[in-house]
């Protein structure tokens, strides 16, 4: 623990206590009510402060940092409207079970009874996007509240904890250091569930193991999963959206449940048993007229071997032990041929990506409509970490990559970014430039909310001119190279797939951010 | 009322009923759960649909539309995260008492029990930023719920009403037209308060009349206010932030309570009586160590002649009648000399603006730190409507101007836009380009969250390097001309004030949007 002064204010006690507990990065978009934190961060120099020009950038970056560092991310936000701006990416982090602590400045306690312009029900605003909310009470207990938030965030599964920070308890003297509190570990494996899983695997009936969260992050657990499958004939699959998958050559490829409702139902139709490991029974992203919400067939028996609050790798190890399975070597996924010159299609783009991805890349996948076609590239490529949009709230890709790069400045980051989604948090490019991060953003420019055209069809409608007006983004055309330049990120537009492949290779090999607008 | 089919789904019944009640513009950022609205809007062709690339643009534009059209704005938003993205500008609209109806798509009722990726506590998310929230129950009652939302929104004062729209009640047949319900009028004038106001004016002690909301929008009411002041020696002032002020040559100039705490306290220190007309007792934006929250002196006696739910112009007319005051002619505000060539300072910019503002301009004021220096230009200029950031949540200027231009395509819109604030909702430039709106955005480029430097000082801190890192925006420099070009808006950077003045004049005279990056 670093030395610290005997007298300090509440804000400084929080900063110093968080740092003593291992937090050394703060993602921030501060306002007036956070000035005492800005001051404390400035004076202590204990944390790397990362500025976002919009709060959704701050929380998306914090999420990417947490996914790649394995440490909780801390954010600094401004009152109820600032929290609201941050909320969509907190929603995504929460669905991903990512550990995060938000410090949200509030009016001074004595000012709260007046309806000042920025007043709103801040606890009410935070609650729907947090697993835990508390408002600090005084300078002396402020740091211990922060340690409780950190404990909640780091417990299994990861959680979003929000500590509301009234301005005066930050200014006030009397801050006291607080020690870290050990978080709750995962829920232990249940013997009955283990027996049921073994029976399912030995039933001779079609069985699927649905593996999520930390299983997908653990190369050894995936090798055991393959061993269990080889031994029993069971198949395995991941949920549609995952916080991090360790993928690429030498690793076990795991397919995902498709996003499209008909494909998802078809993919799971044959199973009579499903074993859940750090996952939940899969449901459709949306309901559609005449389609079920639950994706597994009604006759399928579901065994929760480990819930999302369990320890999936340990559960798989125990299961493997029971049935005598050993870790299996990954089957090799064939590398697609390097594409020759020609138009950028989803197929040629996937081949370019598989070939161009550098070793140990971090791939950020907000490809949306293009996601299904591009996903297989991650299995064929060199080893990589693949991070996806987890809560369905678009606008995560650019910030997530900024944060991942801060956690792992030694690794190149490649972002597969749908154009419509990019515009929600385009400001994150500036943070990439400011931090000098090696992020290559590939804009998949189809000039439309393409996925919504399919969704309109799914509810039984045919788009007319006014509907297309709300789904097409071609009037005026967005120029992402100009947008990037406006925020200090160099870029170029590419229309040929071979050129695209070389652009990815060059950008990943160079330091600093780059943007490629791929016209598809 | 337009004719309508006997059989229609819930979404169509809502669209047709809103249109029959006078709503003909819909500001939208739809997703899957709103596809039935997209379809209904498409088939009926009853509304002009304005697309925003981010939800904060949608609600900021709806606010600008409502402020300039006098009609409630309707928005279409996507689930809890989409609402959260929209919330900061709803907060501003709510503080401005602007009438607004939000339709927020939700999962189908039968899908809500599953924890689908986009599920969250949507009612909880909407409540802190709405004056009224209801969730639709079935197709048959959906339109009557929408009419209730419209009634609430249009009541005095204007309110933000949010109707949550489960997807299936939009698809389902059985939609029924519903008729408009008359909204509540303003609270009647209270005779006791009127007598107290008369006594204050006749007391011979220093008296201030604080006038807000519809008084500031009413040229005749302002002339009466001046008459009351001339007759009694009372002074008058407006709150710091106002939804719309009718200003310029021939109109009564109204000063505002300053934003800075010391200036605000000094401005109001001498008064022994305050008469409130569509306003509340003024409070500081924030609390500061050693400063009061309430801005009027403790000894000041406050009379609420009309609350924010009252009828300010009527109250002033009654008061004038009681004391025998007549409408007064406005004093002429001197036009500053046209600036000659030289650097752009706040002073020279104010002079350029006063000279360059075209007749009948709509001025959008999100100048933030520069606001105090630029405000007087609105009194010297030709007649104009002046719209400000009302709830303190930055990121309103660009969307507000987009919506104001849709309400009044016949009037030029000039936006005074701080650079840091611009970046929260920069996507609104695309909507301006798409709609071909005559909006001239003047970026006040000081490369900093300049206002926060003052705020850091106000809490007693001196900024060091790390603090300045969180307050300066100069690494990398933003290039707003490139950002605008990326969204289809032409622009130029200007460093000379005479050139700036000509650029404003040229841009306002030309159709379509333009951006001027003014280096100050």
Image (cartoon, coloured by chain):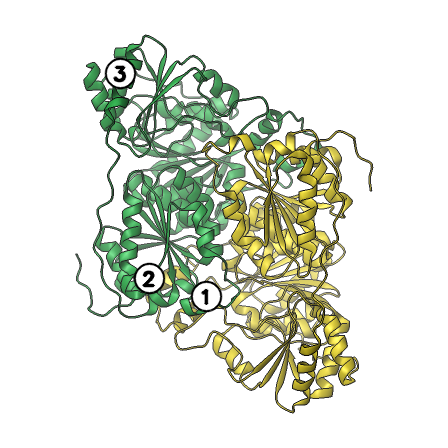
Chain colours: A yellow, B green
Q: Name the residue under label 2.
A: A466
Asked whether A26 or B499 is in front, the reply is A26
Could you tell me which secondary element the residue under label 3 belongs to?
helix
- In the image, which disc is placed on residue B198? 3
Using the image, determine if residue A340 lies above or below residue A448: below
Q: Residue at x 61, y 61 (%)?
A: A96
Residue B497's spot in the image, x, y percent? 48, 27
Asked whether B407 or B7 is in front, the reply is B7
Q: Name the residue under label 1.
A: B112
Q: Residue at x 30, y 55 (%)?
A: B146
Could you tell me which secondary element the residue under label 1 belongs to?
loop
Is B420 left, or right, of A152 in this rendering?
Answer: left
Asked if labels 1 and 3 touch by Cβ distance under 8 angstroms, the answer is: no
User: Mark 2: few, some, or many residues within 10 Å (few <14, many ≥20)?
Assistant: some
Are labels 2 and 1 assigned to the same chain? no
Q: Which residue lies furthest to the bottom in this view?
A: A204
- C-alpha separation, residue under disc 2 versus residue under disc 1: 29 Å
Residue B520's spot in the image, x, y percent? 54, 29
Is B303 left, or right, of A366 in this rendering?
Answer: left
Q: Quadrant of residue B190?
A: top left
- C-alpha separation, residue under disc 3 versus residue under disc 1: 58 Å
Exactly how many numbered labels are in the figure?
3
User: Mark 1: few, some, or many residues within 10 Å (few <14, many ≥20)?
Assistant: some
Could you tell me which secondary element the residue under label 2 belongs to?
helix
Q: Foreground mark, 2 or 1? A: 1
- C-alpha separation, residue under disc 3 versus residue under disc 2: 57 Å
Residue B364's spot in the image, x, y percent? 40, 35
Is B71 left, or right, of A243 in this rendering?
Answer: left
Q: Foreground mark, 3 or 2? A: 3
**Can I make out residue B468 in this image?**
no
């Amino acid at each position: 623990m670093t030395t610290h002064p005997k007298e300090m204010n509440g804000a400084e006690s929080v900063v110093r206590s968080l740092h003593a507990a291992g937090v050394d990065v703060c993602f921030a978009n501060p306002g007036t009510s956070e000035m005492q934190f800005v001051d404390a961060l400035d004076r202590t120099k204990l944390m790397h402060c990362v500025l976002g020009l919009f709060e959704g950038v701050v929380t998306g970056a914090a999420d990417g940092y947490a996914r790649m560092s394995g440490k909780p991310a801390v954010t600094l936000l401004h009152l109820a409207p600032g929290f609201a701006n941050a909320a969509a990416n907190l929603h995504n982090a929460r669905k991903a079970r990512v550990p995060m602590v938000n410090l949200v400045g509030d009016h001074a306690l004595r000012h709260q009874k007046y309806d000042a312009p920025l007043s709103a029900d801040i606890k009410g605003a935070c609650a729907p996007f947090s697993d835990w909310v508390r408002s600090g009470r005084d300078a002396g207990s402020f740091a211990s509240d922060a340690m409780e938030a950190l404990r909640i965030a780091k417990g299994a599964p990861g959680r979003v904890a929000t500590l509301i920070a009234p301005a005066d308890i930050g200014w006030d003297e009397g801050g006291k250091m607080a020690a870290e509190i050990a978080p709750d570990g995962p829920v232990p494996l249940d013997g009955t569930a283990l027996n049921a899983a073994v029976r399912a695997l030995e039933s001779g009936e079609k069985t699927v193991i649905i593996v999520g969260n930390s299983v997908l992050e653990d190369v050894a657990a995936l090798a055991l999963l393959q061993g269990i499958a080889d031994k029993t004939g069971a198949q395995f699959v991941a949920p549609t959206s995952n916080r991090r998958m360790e993928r690429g050559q030498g690793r076990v490829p795991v397919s995902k449940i498709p996003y499209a409702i008909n494909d998802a139902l078809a993919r799971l139709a044959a199973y009579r048993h499903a074993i859940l490991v750090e996952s939940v029974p899969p449901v459709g992203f949306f309901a559609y007229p005449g389609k079920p919400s639950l994706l597994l067939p009604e006759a399928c028996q579901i065994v929760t071997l480990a819930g999302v609050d369990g320890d999936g790798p340990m559960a798989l190890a125990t299961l493997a032990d029971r049935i005598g399975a050993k870790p299996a070597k990954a089957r090799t996924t064939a590398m697609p041929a390097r594409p020759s010159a020609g138009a950028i299609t989803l197929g040629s783009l996937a081949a370019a990506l598989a070939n161009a991805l550098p070793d140990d890349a971090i791939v950020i996948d907000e490809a949306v409509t293009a996601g299904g076609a591009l996903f297989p590239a991650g299995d064929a490529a060199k080893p990589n970490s693949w991070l996806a949009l987890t809560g369905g709230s678009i606008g995560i890709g650019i910030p997530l990559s900024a944060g991942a790069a801060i956690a792992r400045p030694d690794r190149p980051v490649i972002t597969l970014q749908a154009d419509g989604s990019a515009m929600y948090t385009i400001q994150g490019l500036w943070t990439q430039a400011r931090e000098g991060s090696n992020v290559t953003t590939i804009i998949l420019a189809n000039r439309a909310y393409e996925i919504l055209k399919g969704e309109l069809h799914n509810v039984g409608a045919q788009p007319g001119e006014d509907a297309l007006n709300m789904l097409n983004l071609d009037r005026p055309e967005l120029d992402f190279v100009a947008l990037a330049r406006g925020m200090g990120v160099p870029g170029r537009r590419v229309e040929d797939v071979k050129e695209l492949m070389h652009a990815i290779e060059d950008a990943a090999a160079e330091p600093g951010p780059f943007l490629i607008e791929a016209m598809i």
